[in-house]
Amino acid sequence: MLVVCLGAAESNPRSSAPAVKKVSHQVLAFYYGWYGNPQITGHWTHWTNVDETNKVIGSATHYPQVGPYDSHDPKIVEQHCQWAKSAGITGFIVSWWAQGDFHDQGLPLMLDTAQTNGLKITIYYETVPPRNAPKPEGAVDDLLYILNRYGKHPAWLKVGGKPVVFVYGRAVGQIGLDGWRSVIGEVNKRYHGGAIFVGDRISAEAARIFSGIHTYNPTGKTAGMSVALIQEWAKVNYPQWVATAARDRIACITIIPGYDDHKLGRKEPRPISDRHQGETYRVLWEEAIAAHPDWIIITSWNEWHEGSEIEPSVENGDQDLKITAEFAPKFLASPLRSASGTR
């Protein structure tokens, strides 16, 4: 395995991010630890109108194979980690919202269970406080809390010894790229050794601010498409995403098995991407590997509200885990982007 090395920041004075010289492949899945049930948490959280007899949940497109679980249940977290490891997933990007909230309370269990199963954990930083007027200093406070509390855990995803944090597009937009430039600079000044930030925006401007770029959800581009059109779209766009990351940045490609959030009451029409009996996921895997990114990101492990989960369901069984297990090892064994001359 290649050792990850970090150089100094780019010579561009407007760049805040440490430059990434070499990075090992990862297959990471977005993970949601926001579910609760009466047996563990004492009430339903995120699951609504649950009908366990008929296997229907009002707020979920599909029904989990293990039923409407609680994210704080050690048996569930253990099962998720075992499934993920067996499928070739190397880690989870765990949704995180606020200090001390339900998501934050579940993070120690995620980290400890991931460690015993040989997985890595990072967070998806979802929103900048305060709620009514997000400010860079709110992000700095949150991120220093996260890094000081969890960043040295053996299971935390690191690049060159630096803990990695993913930043969701909402949080990027709340304070803008200039705001994130100042946040990253301040955090790296105050957190010993610094951190690596991967922002949810595919643009050259974002690549000058963050050490890596990604997008959470491509369904706005693939909605309503046939399998052939989805593959054609990916064949054109995935290499462009990698090229936008350019040298010294982590290039991520996002794949998705399908998307259907029609149960959430959002404004119609919804951007629904059909699963096509697993073929959507399969062709996106093929094109993602062909584009030679650093990391492949899966949306999602368990976003049941939006129907993008690869966790086994009553409707789809373990189809998506089998596809993951087919392709993830191929990607992990493929030449690194730095070795192929694309950096």
Image (cartoon, helix red, strand yellow):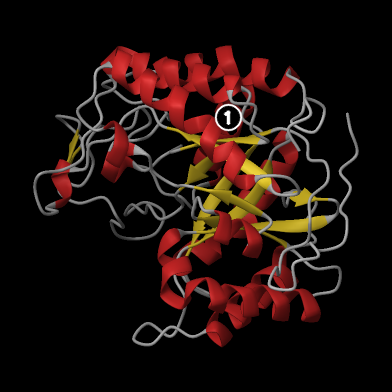
Quadrant for residue 335, please give it: top right
Amino acid marked by disc 1: Ala
Quarter of the picture containing the C terminus is top right
Query: Is 92 placed above or below 148 here?
Result: above
Task: Tell me residue 128's x, y (percent).
Answer: 47, 76
Residue 69 x %, y %? 38, 43
Question: Which quadrant of the view contains residue 7?
Answer: bottom right
As drawn, is 12 to the left or to the right of 33?
right
| Left-right relation of 76 to 7 | left
Give the residue displayed 28% in from the left and 36% down from the top: 307
Considering the numbered disc 1 on the image, is that residue within a helix, a strand or a loop? helix
Camera-side residue: 47 or 267?
A: 267
Task: Work out which quarter of the rendered image holds the N terminus and state it.
Answer: top right
Q: Nearer the viewer, residue 72 or 18?
A: 18
Q: How many marks?
A: 1
Residue 330 sits in quarter: top right
Which residue is under mark 1? 84
Q: Is residue 154 above or below residue 177?
A: above
Give the percent coordinates (x, y) of residue 56: 17, 35
